[in-house]
Image (spheres, rainbow, N blue to C red):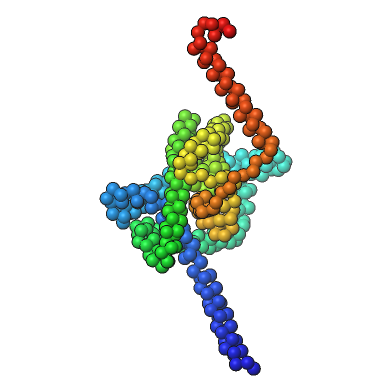
């Protein structure tokens, strides 16, 4: 046996053991890595506001705390408005439930030629008391699982918020710490990439916030004119969901006010649906290009593909941070990759040439007309 073979076998076993240990540790810490990634993108979105306050003399810790308070108030107001709307609608449905059941029984009897009654349904329900107990036990188990999930979600939200606060308040220190681990030639590139990510993520949040405010105001005016209940809460729902939920946010945003309008007046539901569609076109072709031209613009196809990829990799969290990540990657591509002139289609070249000649002919006709006007009466007669 060669003398190097035992050492090679031991080294291979050690490497395999280290790989298994690293794989186990990675799977155990995957949730922490995801929370750190979310906190990093949130800090990139919040840091421009903190930088503006720091430039006016406010300490970064206090500025970060004030931004967190403002975000907490906004989220609490949004949830309170939706909670009030939800409780009211549930209470209304519960109050109308006997009437709805009577209508359903009448429809079943007329359609299927049955002779059902409310008393018969009550007797059948009471007869299946064992099934009711089983359903109650399942509901209790689901409620326990839901409470555990809620507690876990609150802990994760607290963890993300804590890391976001530290990343934002100590942003310059974090960058200096990261750059101190790199050679001087690489530090400038890291700082430049970090600034691109900061600008793109902050610009995305800023543009979405402006679009959400515009959407909220427009829909609130329309809902108030129609006399819908909780017009302000519905308008906030439409503004937030349509701008901050990727891909399906527009459909979710318009579905709730349409359903509420159906419970009030079916004709109002058509008005709401038409207004949502018209406003979406106005936003796509008028508001969105003007606002994102100053911040960040992501092509709809790129945004859709980024959401699908993010959801496949990290689930709902990946879908939420996919578009800022795509905007950051787009900024990297535009900064670091060299662009070349594109060889156009000869048919496009001929079309451009025809348009150029037409512009030249119109300009020449305008010049002749100006000379005729200035030339006096003789030139005008000619």
Left or right position of 39 against 56: right
Residue pictured at 60% horizontal, 92% vertical:
3
Residue 371 position within the rendered picture, expressed as x and y whole percent measured from the top left: 52, 14
The image shows residue 212, relative to residue 265, as above or below, that is: below
Whether residue 179 is visible here, answered yes or no, is yes
The image shows residue 169, relative to residue 213, as above or below, that is: below
The image shows residue 247, relative to residue 175, as above or below, that is: above
Residue 159 position within the rendered picture, expressed as x and y whole percent measured from the top left: 41, 62
Left or right position of 315 against 165: right
Residue pictured at 72% horizontal, 42% vertical:
112
In the depicted view, which residue is nearer to us: 254 or 139? 254
Q: Residue furthest left?
A: 57
Residue pictured at 44% horizontal, 35% vertical:
217
Q: Give the quadrant of the N terminus.
A: bottom right
Whether residue 133 is visible here, answered yes or no, is no
In the depicted view, which residue is nearer to us: 275 or 180? 180
Left or right position of 326 against 182: right
Q: Give the quadrant of the C terminus.
A: top right
In the depicted view, which residue is nearer to us: 289 or 73? 289
Residue 171 position within the rendered picture, expressed as x and y whole percent measured from the top left: 37, 58
Residue 24 position within the rendered picture, expressed as x and y whole percent measured from the top left: 53, 74
Quadrant location of residue 103?
top right
Residue pictured at 65% horizontal, 36% vertical:
349
């Amino acid at each position: 046996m060669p003398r190097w073979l035992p050492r090679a076998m031991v080294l291979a076993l050690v490497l395999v053991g280290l790989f298994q240990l690293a794989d186990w540790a990675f799977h155990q810490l995957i949730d922490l890595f995801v929370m750190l990634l979310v906190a990093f993108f949130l800090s990139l979105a919040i840091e421009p506001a903190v930088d503006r306050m720091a430039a006016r003399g406010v300490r970064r810790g206090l500025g970060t705390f004030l931004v967190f308070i403002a975000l907490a108030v906004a989220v609490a107001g949004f949830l309170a408005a939706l909670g009030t709307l939800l409780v009211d609608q549930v209470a209304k449905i519960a109050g109308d439930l006997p009437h709805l059941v009577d209508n359903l029984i009448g429809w079943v009897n007329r359609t299927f030629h049955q002779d059902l009654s409310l008393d018969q349904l009550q007797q059948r329900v009471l007869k299946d008391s064992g099934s009711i107990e089983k359903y109650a036990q399942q509901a209790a188990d689901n409620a326990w699982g839901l409470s555990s999930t809620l507690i876990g979600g609150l802990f994760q939200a607290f963890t993300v918020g804590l890391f976001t606060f530290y990343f934002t308040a100590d942003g310059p220190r974090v960058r200096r710490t990261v750059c101190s681990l790199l050679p001087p030639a690489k530090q400038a590139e890291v700082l430049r990439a970090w600034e691109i990510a900061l600008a793109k993520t902050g610009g995305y949040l800023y543009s979405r916030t402006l679009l959400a405010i515009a959407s909220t105001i427009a829909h609130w005016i329309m809902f108030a004119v129609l006399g819908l209940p909780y017009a302000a809460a519905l308008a906030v729902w439409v503004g937030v969901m349509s701008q901050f939920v990727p891909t399906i946010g527009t459909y979710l945003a318009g579905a709730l006010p349409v359903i509420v309008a159906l419970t009030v007046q079916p004709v109002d539901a058509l008005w709401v649906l038409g207004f949502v569609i018209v406003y979406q076109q106005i936003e796509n072709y008028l508001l969105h290009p003007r606002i994102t031209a100053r911040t960040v613009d992501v092509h709809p196809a790129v945004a859709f593909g980024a959401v699908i990829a993010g959801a496949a990799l990290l689930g709902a969290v990946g879908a939420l941070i996919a578009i800022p990540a795509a905007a950051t990657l787009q900024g990297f591509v535009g900064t670091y990759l060299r662009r070349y002139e594109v060889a156009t289609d000869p048919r496009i070249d001929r079309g451009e040439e025809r348009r150029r000649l037409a512009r030249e002919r119109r300009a020449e006709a305008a010049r002749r007309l100006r000379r005729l006007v200035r030339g006096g009466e003789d030139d005008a007669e000619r």
